[in-house]
Image: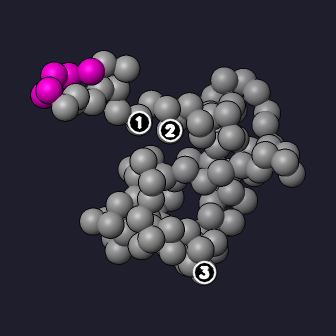
Amino acid sequence: MNRSEVVESFYTSWAWRKCRKAYAKSKGNLCEKCLRRGRINPGTKEQPLETHHKIPLTDDNINDPSITLNWNNLELLCKACHDEEKEKKKKRWTVGADGKVILG
């Protein structure tokens, strides 16, 4: 799923960069999911930690700071954990041209 230009522009905004940096610092710059699994993962220069929105940003909610900038909607994740989260949110089915559901 590709992000819209509106959502993309948010991710380059000063407000987001400031929020993301402060949130990461508050979490000790460690992957939260790895910590829950008993691992310490500060990320690497090649694969830095990513600040993940639990409720994904859309054109409909992009102007709602309770979603975009609310720390309760954020999670600091390493690339592997972030990829896991994105995979979970992928649609598990599609509808074919014939109207039948296709799983996978």
The CA span between labels 2 and 3 is 25 Å
User: In the rendering, which numbered label is found on residue 86?
Assistant: 2
Residue 6 in the image, given as x and y percentages of width and height: 42, 73
Tell me the mark number nearer the camera, choosing from 3 and 1: 1
Residue toward you, 76 or 44: 44
Provide the residue designation for mark 3: 14
Residue at image coords 13%, 28%: 99
Magenta range is 98-102
Q: Nearer the viewer, residue 91 or 32?
A: 91
The amino acid beneath tag 2 is Lys
- Compared with 29, 41 (above or below) is above
Mark 2 residue element: helix
Task: Tell me the quarter of the picture where residue 82 sits.
Answer: top right
- Depth-wise, is mark 2 or mark 3 nearer the camera? 2
Please name the residue shown 29% across and 26% down the image.
Answer: 93
Of all residues shown, which one is farthest toward the left?
A: 99
Answer whether residue 12 is visible to the viewer in this image: yes
Disc 1 to disc 2: CB gap under 8 Å: yes
**Residue at horizontal 68%, vertical 66%?**
21
Density class for disc 3 (Cα within 10 Å; few <14, some 14-19, many ≥20) is few
Front position in the image: 91 or 68: 91
Q: Which residue is mark 1?
A: 89
The colour style of the image is: one colour
Q: In this rendering, would 74 be left or right of 43?
A: left
* 99 falls in the magenta region: yes
Judge whether 95 appears above or below 42 on screen. above
Which quarter of the picture shows residue 31?
A: top right
Secondary structure character of the magenta stretch overall = loop
- The first of marks 3 and 1 along the sequence is 3
Q: Secondary structure at mark 1?
A: helix
Q: Secondary structure at mark 3?
A: helix
Q: Is residue 19 above or below residue 43?
A: below
